[in-house]
Amino acid sequence: MNRIPEPVYEKDVATLVRYFRRAMHDIEVELMRMDLSDFRRANALAVQAQIREILKDLDANITAWASTTFPKAAQEGVARSIVSLGVAETFSEAMKIVKFNELNKSLIELAIADTQADLLQVTQNIDRRTRNAIRQAMADVMRENMAQGVNGVRSIRRDFLAEARRQLGDSLNTGIIDASNRRWKPTDYADMVTRTKLHTTYREAARNDAIDRGALYGVISSHGATDACRNWEGKVVKFVADAPGHYPYIGDLPRREIFHPRCRHHVSPIRRPDLA
Ligand SMILES: [Zn+2]
């Protein structure tokens, strides 16, 4: 069989994660720069506005990233189908003749929209948490001032300010809770979500293209996995539930075992399962 490169999205995911890291860093700088001895509302509002600006930039970066990266993953998936089915000789040749059918057009649209929605949740979460933390810190400082009955801000205890600052910083690190109740740091979550979606897009694009060409089966890739996926390596699956033969339907495979979050396995389309 012609060599088809494995889908690798390390650089793409790293770029996206870098956008997150930079935004988180910039927000942290804003939070740490905040003048805690000045508890006027205007001070807090200015910091919040800065943070919102940073998050708006991050959202824009996410959108731009998703709009170029998902079509690329789908294109590579389709190219795998084209070479696997013998429509083109080489992968680079296949990449040039890739056309997205209707299924794949909506697959890409959905992947982009999904990613935006998932990551928007993260940025909204950061916005909410930092806003609460700022409000809390302002209230704490005000209370501390009153309790001491002083006007001079210098007399606020140093350890008190340090604690307020620590809580501000913490507001950035509290993570996202996913559907299976696991807690993620924002950057780890962004990494997991995009990595998983890119591989899913690649896999589904190959499948959609193959079905269109009348190829209803595929072979699951092998890279010597050590997790539960290993039991599925090299197995033949059906691309549509009612294709003939006793092969498992790809849509029915247990997600705990194969195509789980961060799974790198993909499927090469074939026409004849008996020849696999
Ligand atoms: Zn896997």
Image (tube, grey):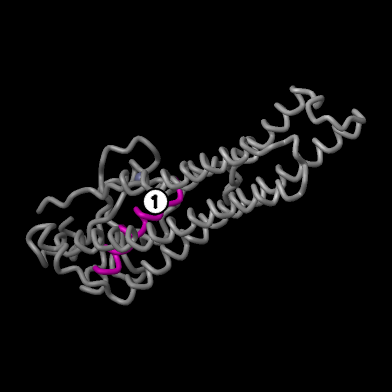
**In the image, residue 236 lies at what x, y percent?**
27, 55
Left or right placement of residue 105 versus residue 1 in this view: right
* Label 1 CB-ligand 1 distance < 8 A: yes
Q: Quadrant of residue 250?
A: bottom left
- Is residue 1 in view from this perspective? no
x and y, in percent, of residue 89 in the image: 7, 61
At mark 1, the secondary structure is loop
The answer to whether residue 79 is visible is yes
Q: Looking at the image, which residue is at 58% across and 51% down?
A: 179
What is the total number of numbered labels drawn onto the structure image?
A: 1
Task: Report the amino acid beneath label 1.
Answer: Phe
Looking at this rendering, what residue extends furthest in the bottom direction? 102
Q: In which quarter of the image is residue 76?
A: bottom left
The quarter of the picture showing ligand 1: top left
Residue depicted at 47% across the width and 46% down the height: 20
Q: What stretch is highlighted in magenta?
A: 192-209
- Crowding around mark 1 (Cα neighbors within 10 Å: few <14, some 14 to 19, many 20+) is some
The residue nearer to you, when weighing 171 against 158, is 158
Instruction: Name the magenta segment's main secondary structure.
Output: helix
Coordinates of residue 36 in the picture (x, y in percent):
72, 36
**Residue for point 67% across, 37% down:** 168
- Residue furthest to the front in view is 152
